[in-house]
Amino acid sequence: MIGIQLKDFDIDIKTKRGIDGKIAVGMVVGDALRQNQAVILTMHKGELKERPAVGCGISDMLLDYDPAAWRHEIREQMEMDGQRVNSVTITTKEIKIDAEYR
């Protein structure tokens, strides 16, 4: 999926002006899959006003003992975003999500 790119969780803007001095290019666009996954993983439920059910809140995972519940939550959230999830793997060093947009 092509979408607006973020830089440090803010819109990435790189303006270029045309020969007439007007802004010809502004926001950077590109593949948004990984950044959308990162945003969903870091957000807690209720942070997104328009969709309060979105968010995994992985900062809460730090001292939790149930990775199966987190895998289920991550899969559910990614599917709500329109992704087809093949697998979710959680290790002590990373969360790996094998998914793509339908």
Image (cartoon, rainbow, N blue to C red):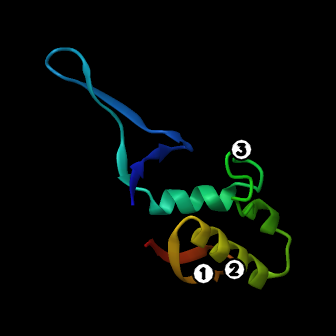
Instruction: Give the percent coordinates (x, y) of residue 15.
Output: 32, 28
Q: Which residue is at a point 44% across and 38% down the rendered structure image?
A: 12
Placement of 68 over or under 53, stated as above or below: below
* Front residue of 101 and 92: 101
90 w.r.t. 42: above or below = below
Quadrant location, the N terminus: bottom left
Label 2, label 1: how many angstroms apart (C-alpha)?
Answer: 6 Å
Residue picked out by circle 1: 88
Q: Amino acid at mark 2?
A: Arg
User: Which comes sooner in the sequence, label 3 or label 2?
Assistant: 3
Mark sitting earlier along the chain (3/1)? 3
Which badge, 2 or 1, is on the more N-terminal residue? 2
**Element on which disc 1 rests:** strand
For disc 2, the marked residue is 71
Residue at point 53%, 58% (across, down)? 36
Q: How many marks?
A: 3
Given the image, on which type of amino acid does mark 1 rest?
Val
Q: Gap in Å between the C-alphas at discs 3 and 1?
A: 27 Å
Q: Residues within 10 Å of mark 1 (few under 14, many from 20)?
A: some
At x 74%, y 47%, the residue is 47
User: Residue 71 occupies which quadrant of the picture?
Assistant: bottom right
Q: Amino acid at mark 3?
A: Lys
| Labelled pair 2, 1 in contact (Cβ < 8 Å) | yes
Q: Please state the horizontal and vertical placement of residue 96, each as a whole percent of the image.
A: 56, 76
- Taking depth in this image into account, of 53 and 36 the one nearest to the observer is 53
Q: Nearer the viewer, residue 63 or 83?
A: 83
Disc 3 designates what residue? 49
Q: Is residue 82 above or below residue 26?
A: below
Give the secondary structure at mark 2.
Answer: helix
